[in-house]
Each structure stands twice: as C-alpha cells, then as structure tokens.
Amino acid sequence: MSHNEPQLQKPGAWLLNASQLSAFDRVLHLIRSGGADVVLVQAPVTQSLYRSYRNNREFDRFMAQKGNYINFNSELISLDEQDHFYDAQHLNQDGVILFNTELLDRHLADRLRRKRLASDRK
C-alpha cells in the first residue's frame, strides 16, 4: 500500500473564477431540472493541505448555499496522513474504503431513508 509522507503546505485559498461559477450553476440547474437530488461532496485531502487554505469557512458557506453539502475535511471521518493518503490530494486504497463507507453507508443511505419515509407519509 502506498503511503504519503507529510509535507509542509504553502498557504493558499480556494479560488473560483466567474466562468467556473457560471458553469457550476448551469450544471446544478440542469441536474435539478431533471428531478434529481444533488449532494455536493468535498472529498478529503490531508489535514496539512486543508489547513493551508485560508478561506475554508467561506468556501463551505458558498457550497452550502448551492445545496446539500458534506465536507469530509471536518470531523466526519478520521484519516491518517501517512496511512490513508497516496499524496496530499489523493486517498490510497485504505483511505478510499474508509471514505466510501462513510459516504455511502452513513450519509447517503441515511438521506435515502429519510426521503423514503417522507414519501411514505404523503
């Protein structure tokens, strides 16, 4: 299994230009116009990389305004930088298994159950 060697990250910021924002809004509209639910997911990166971004809270607020948003760089999942990452931005297979389990078995399955219960009550 590949392991990541933690590295010091340069400070950065999430940057989205106007054309990206416009395209993102069009894609969300297209998906929703077809009747599909949208769940926006920020996949985990190493904590050293995530903490290097100065505007995480601003980015989270922006994404939450766009729809159901889950940021897996919060306390939702416990990943070790050396054991679960191939590099700062990519999970290795062990990390993928943990992430997929958390996303699919807990978050999305729970959303589907709640949606099913709501439709049964109608």
Image (cartoon, helix red, strand yellow):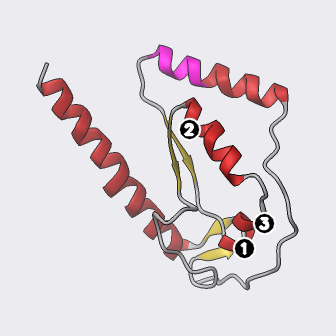
Amino acid type at mark 2: Ala
Verify CB contact (< 8 Å) between mark 1 and mark 2.
Answer: no
In this rendering, position of residue 118 left or right of residue 77:
left
**Do the CB atoms of the residues marked 1 and 3 lie less than 8 Å apart?**
yes
Whether 32 is among the magenta residues is yes
Left or right of 57, for residue 12: right
Q: What residue type is disc 3 on?
A: Ser
| Residue under the image location 68 percent in, 28 percent down | 24
Residue 94 place in picture, x, y as percent: 50, 76
Where residue 45 appears, as percent x and y from the top left, is 65, 65
**Magenta stretch in the rendered image:** 28-34
Side of 111 relative to 87 (left or right): left
Q: If you read the primary sequence from the N terminus, does the residue marked by circle 2 or circle 3 appear first?
A: 3
Work out which residue is located at the far top of the displayed protein and give it.
Answer: 33
Residue type highlighted by circle 1: Ser
- For disc 1, the neighbor class at 10 Å (few under 14, some 14 to 19, many from 20) is some
Real-space CA distance between mark 2 and mark 3, rounded to the nearest whole angstrom: 21 Å
Residue 90 drawn above or below residue 21: below
Q: Secondary structure at mark 2?
A: helix
The crowd level at tag 2 (other Cα within 10 Å; few <14, some 14-19, many 20+) is some
Q: Is residue 60 above or below residue 95?
A: above
Position in image of residue 101 (x %, y %): 38, 63
Task: Indicate the quadrant containing the C terminus: top left, top right, bottom left or bottom right.
Answer: top left
Mark 3 element type: helix
Residue 105 on image: x %, y %: 32, 57
Residue placed under numbered mark 1 in the picture? 48
Residue at image coords 66%, 71% = 46
Secondary structure type for disc 1: helix
Which residue position is annotated with label 2? 64
Marks 1 and 3, Cα distance to the nearest angstrom? 6 Å
Q: Which residue is mark 3?
A: 52
